[in-house]
């Protein structure tokens, strides 16, 4: 009886030795069987590897063992999983980091570094790939940017690691210009949402180039030359910024101000004048982290031609001295001195003579047409009142020449050359640019030419059109 039991157990062991390899063959697929004789007793391989860690065979003394098969590595196509929402292109961004906004698997866009492994895993909840907090067999690397004028492209290097082998794939994705960088509520700038209506709610207005500062500002206001004036706010809260193409503004203390991009400006909202056309100025506004970005446009309103006929209200009476002339203005006699400033607003004339009045006009707290008296000269035997006038926005300037007929001509001391009056800088003195006691009434034999400092040059380099008018009484 005992012999029968031993014989039955022996047959069972033989059957198991045959069945188990067949089952593994069916489970693994194509399996190559290697005779044990190929492995010598002196072999140093104490542990034979298989594709599955749980199936390692150690010290096998059977007739056959399993040999590791060659399995294909399937690298998933990630082009449909990754959306390039742009890069942190703030002018003050750290270019060494080379950051890009990527949305992976429909997730919220994140600011990610280039040339750094980004590990991915398949999310069970969505069935799509997303960023993994730990290392995984699948990862991608963002290559350095490849920019062009119209769009931006991003090179992606993807890697799949399995069975001690790697499979790689490179592909290119373009920036989705309409893709939102954030699905949440946009940030606020001074209690106003950062969206396409931001400038409209801030009452932003494109005024134009301030010719008054160019002609009378001197060194103090030379930084505003050839720049466009933009006003924000209303009433007493109105303030101005001056920009040209490429200049930047930061929002600090509830107002925009000019600033040069640097590490110190990264904590502020920033706006940059990207492009200036004849009637359109294009801006890009960024949040401090560069994640939110919005494009804004300002439209320059059309202005009527500058009318200088209001100077006809100055009626010449005669010369009071070598540096003063008597005129009648709205029934009252006044004395005009060289480089006097007269402001015309709501059909009234105001002489700007005190420092407070001049400061108010410079800050545009006093608005109107500014007439600057350049003196009286003799031209072709007649007395001619000369001056120049700015429109209310100070974006236009015109030369005024008004012939004074039928008046007594005072004695003239001849000079060797015509004395063309030059524009004077801003001076908070009542005696603005007065002539010396020994100066005489100049004569003029040649047609008037605009002095060099009155020629205007717009940001594109072409002279602005100047207007002149001769009023005959």
Image (cartoon, grey):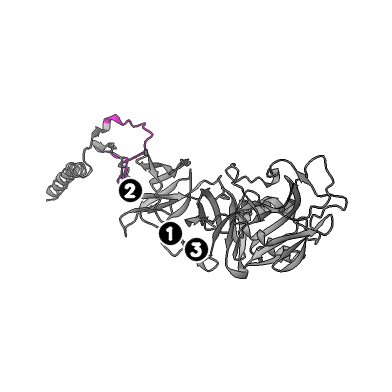
Q: Is residue 42 magenta?
A: yes
Q: Residue at x 84, y 57 (%)?
A: 321
| Residue 34, position as x, y percentages in the image | 25, 33
Which mark sits nearer the N-terminus, 1 or 3? Answer: 1
| Residue 57, position as x, y percentages in the image | 31, 42
Q: Nearer the viewer, residue 34 or 223?
A: 223
**Residue 351 visible (yes or no):** no
Q: Nearer the viewer, residue 328 or 136?
A: 328
Residue at the disc numbered 1 = 182
Which mark sits nearer the N-terminus, 2 or 1? Answer: 2
Disc sitting over residue 80 in the figure: 2
Q: Which element is circle 1 on?
A: loop
| Residue 25, position as x, y percentages in the image | 20, 41
Residue at the disc numbered 3 = 200
Left or right: 416 in relation to 109: right
**Residue 202 visible (yes or no):** yes
Q: Which element is circle 3 on?
A: helix
Which mark sits nearer the N-terminus, 3 or 2? Answer: 2
Q: Are marks 3 and 2 in contact (CB under 8 Å)?
A: no
Q: Is residue 316 magenta?
A: no
Residue 227 position (above or below residue 355) = above
Q: Nearer the viewer, residue 64 or 111?
A: 111
- The CA span between labels 2 and 1 is 19 Å
Image quadrant occupied by the C terminus: bottom right
Count neighbours of disc 2 (C-alpha within 10 A) and say few if under 14, some if 14 to 19, many if 20 or more: few
Left or right: 138 in relation to 347: left
- The CA span between labels 1 and 3 is 22 Å
| Residue 317, position as x, y percentages in the image | 76, 60
Left or right: 178 in relation to 372: left
Give the magenta-colored segment's residue range.
37-61
């Amino acid at each position: 009886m005992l012999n029968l039991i031993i014989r039955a157990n022996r047959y069972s062991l033989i059957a198991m030795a045959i069945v188990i390899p067949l089952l593994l063959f069916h489970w693994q697929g194509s399996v190559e069987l290697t005779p044990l004789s190929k492995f010598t007793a002196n072999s140093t391989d104490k542990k034979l590897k298989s594709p599955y860690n749980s199936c390692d065979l150690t010290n096998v003394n059977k007739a056959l063992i399993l040999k590791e098969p060659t399995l294909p590595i399937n690298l998933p196509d990630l082009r449909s999983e990754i959306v390039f929402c742009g890069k942190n292109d703030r002018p003050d961004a750290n270019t060494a980091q080379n950051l890009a906004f990527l949305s992976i698997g429909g997730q919220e866009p994140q600011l990610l570094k280039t040339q750094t492994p980004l590990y991915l895993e398949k999310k069970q909840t969505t069935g799509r790939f997303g960023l993994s907090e730990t290392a995984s067999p699948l990862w991608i690397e963002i290559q350095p940017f490849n920019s062009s004028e119209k769009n931006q492209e991003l090179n992606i290097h993807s890697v799949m690691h399995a069975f001690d082998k790697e499979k790689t794939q490179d592909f290119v994705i373009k920036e989705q210009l309409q893709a939102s960088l954030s699905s949440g509520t946009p940030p606020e700038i001074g209690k106003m949402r950062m969206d396409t209506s931001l400038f409209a709610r801030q009452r932003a207005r494109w005024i134009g180039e301030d010719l008054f500062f160019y002609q009378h500002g001197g060194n103090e206001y030379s930084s505003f030359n050839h720049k466009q004036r933009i006003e924000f706010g209303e009433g007493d809260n109105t303030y101005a910024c001056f920009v040209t193409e490429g200049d930047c503004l930061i929002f600090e203390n509830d107002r925009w101000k000019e600033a040069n991009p640097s590490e110190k400006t990264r904590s502020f909202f920033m706006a940059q004048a990207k492009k200036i056309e004849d009637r359109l100025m294009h801006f890009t506004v960024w949040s401090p982290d560069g994640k939110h970005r919005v494009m804004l446009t300002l439209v320059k309103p059309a202005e009527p031609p500058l009318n200088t006929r209001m100077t006809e209200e100055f009626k010449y009476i005669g010369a009071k001295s070598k540096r003063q002339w008597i005129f009648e203005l709205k029934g009252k006699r006044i004395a005009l001195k060289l480089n006097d400033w007269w402001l015309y607003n709501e059909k009234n004339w105001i002489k700007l003579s005190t420092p407070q009045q001049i400061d108010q006009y410079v800050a545009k707290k006093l608005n109107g047409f500014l007439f600057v008296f350049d003196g009286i000269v003799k031209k072709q035997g007649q007395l001619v009142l000369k001056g120049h006038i700015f429109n209310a926005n100070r974006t236009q300037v015109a030369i005024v020449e008004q012939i004074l007929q039928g008046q007594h001509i005072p004695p003239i001391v001849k000079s060797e050359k015509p004395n063309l009056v030059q524009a004077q800088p801003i001076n908070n003195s009542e005696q603005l640019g007065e002539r010396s006691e020994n100066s005489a009434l100049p004569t003029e034999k040649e047609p008037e030419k605009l002095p060099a400092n009155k020629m205007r040059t717009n940001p594109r380099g072409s002279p602005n059109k100047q207007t002149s008018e001769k009023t005959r009484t």
